[in-house]
Image (cartoon, rainbow, N blue to C red):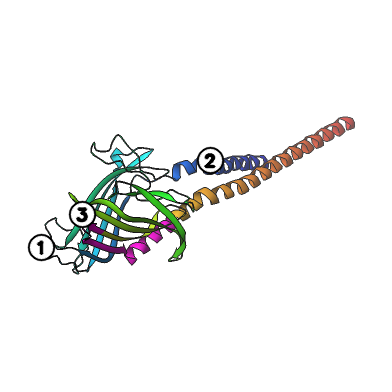
């Protein structure tokens, strides 16, 4: 019975130590990757003004913006994930906050973006499954890598068609979660402010990032566009809604806890409990062997005594 217990403890120690090693060596490369089932909806609110070409009026109005991002799992791979992202900026008249038809007078801007990112680095990449006319994105696009560093990152600007520098700007606690704040600044860059209309563009993009998972938990934009003659045609100042921020923080905390369990708790428990099981199992087997030898010796002594008495 004692010997069987020793073998059970050795088997348990082997299992736990194996799990601990896998959690340290194999799991990070599998777990710390952008999932292929991403589906998110981000809602912004704020104020915007767009020039009325008929009246030249430029009046700020309450607005909302909707951004929906979905992973194209069928065309993604183990290395890359493809995304389809739709967005719109709409005058907020108090109705449902959804993207409206292109003919709706409340629509300010609308866009669809298709891109691919590396599942580990989160950087934009070229991928053979992207549509032929797709502009290949460079730099970070919709998230940061796992284990975010306090450094600057390249960040994709779709209007410029190239990455800009996303500068680390310190830490900020949001709903109890410590985040890293990054800011990208564009000043008076020459662009098409509308299709076929040249002008200049300025923008300040601020994002707060969960340093463990790399997910963005808060975002804001302060954007202006001007014609070449200096006439302002667009002014947008929007930030994530409180509900969107709360949902993003909850998701980041849940994912971070799962990572901590798999990558830290499991190795510690595996090595500690597995080591104890190994030591105790060997101890039990040694005691069993010693007990067996003593029993055998006692039997032999009794046999000799019995023989002598005969």
Asked whether 252 or 310 is in front, the reply is: 252
Describe residue 185's horizontal placement relative to residue 230 as left or right: right
Asked whether 248 or 49 is in front, the reply is: 49
Q: Secondary structure at mark 3?
A: strand
Q: Which image quarter is the N terminus in?
A: top right
Residue pointed to by mark 2: 25
Occupied quadrant, residue 47: bottom left
| Mark 3 burial class by Cα count in 10 Å: few <14, some 14-19, many 20+ | some
Describe residue 40's horizontal placement relative to residue 52 as left or right: right
Q: Which mark is residue 83?
A: none
Region in magenta: 225-254
Q: Which mark is residue 54?
A: 1
**Given contact means CB atoms under 8 Å apart, are the residues at marks 3 and 1 in contact?**
no
Residue pointed to by mark 3: 110
Residue 177 visible? The answer is no
x and y percent of residue 239 in the render?
32, 63
Q: CA distance from mark 1 to mark 2?
A: 64 Å
| Mark 2 burial class by Cα count in 10 Å: few <14, some 14-19, many 20+ | few
Q: Who's the residue at 29% across and 63% down the image?
A: 238
Q: CA distance from mark 3 to mark 1?
A: 21 Å
């Amino acid at each position: 019975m004692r010997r069987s217990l020793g073998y059970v403890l050795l088997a348990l120690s082997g299992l736990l130590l194996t799990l601990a090693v896998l959690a340290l060596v194999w799991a990070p490369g599998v777990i710390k990757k952008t999932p292929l089932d991403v589906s998110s909806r981000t809602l912004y609110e704020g104020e915007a003004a767009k020039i009325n070409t008929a009246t030249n009026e430029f009046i700020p109005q309450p607005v909302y913006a909707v951004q929906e991002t979905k992973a194209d799992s069928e065309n993604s791979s183990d290395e890359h994930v493809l995304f389809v992202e739709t967005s719109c900026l709409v005058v907020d008249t108090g109705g449902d906050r959804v993207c409206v038809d292109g003919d709706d007078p409340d629509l300010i801007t609308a866009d669809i973006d298709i891109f691919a990112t590396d599942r580990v680095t989160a950087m934009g990449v070229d991928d053979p499954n992207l549509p032929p006319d797709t502009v290949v994105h460079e730099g970070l696009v919709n998230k940061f890598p796992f284990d975010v560093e306090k450094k600057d990152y390249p960040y994709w600007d779709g209007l410029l068609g190239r990455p800009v520098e996303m500068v680390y700007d310190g830490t900020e606690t949001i709903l109890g979660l410590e985040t890293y704040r990054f800011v990208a600044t564009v000043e008076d860059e020459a662009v098409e402010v509308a299709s076929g209309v040249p002008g200049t563009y300025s923008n300040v993009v601020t994002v707060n990032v969960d340093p463990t998972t790399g997910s963005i938990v808060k975002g804001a934009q302060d954007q202006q566009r001007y014609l070449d003659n200096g006439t302002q045609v667009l002014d947008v100042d929007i930030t994530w809604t409180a509900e969107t921020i709360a949902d993003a923080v909850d998701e980041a905390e849940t994912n971070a806890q799962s990572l901590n369990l798999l990558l830290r708790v499991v190795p510690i428990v595996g090595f500690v409990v597995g080591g104890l099981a190994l030591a105790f199992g060997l101890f039990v087997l040694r005691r069993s062997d010693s007990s067996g030898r003593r029993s055998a010796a006692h039997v032999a002594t009794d046999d000799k005594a019995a023989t002598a008495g005969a």
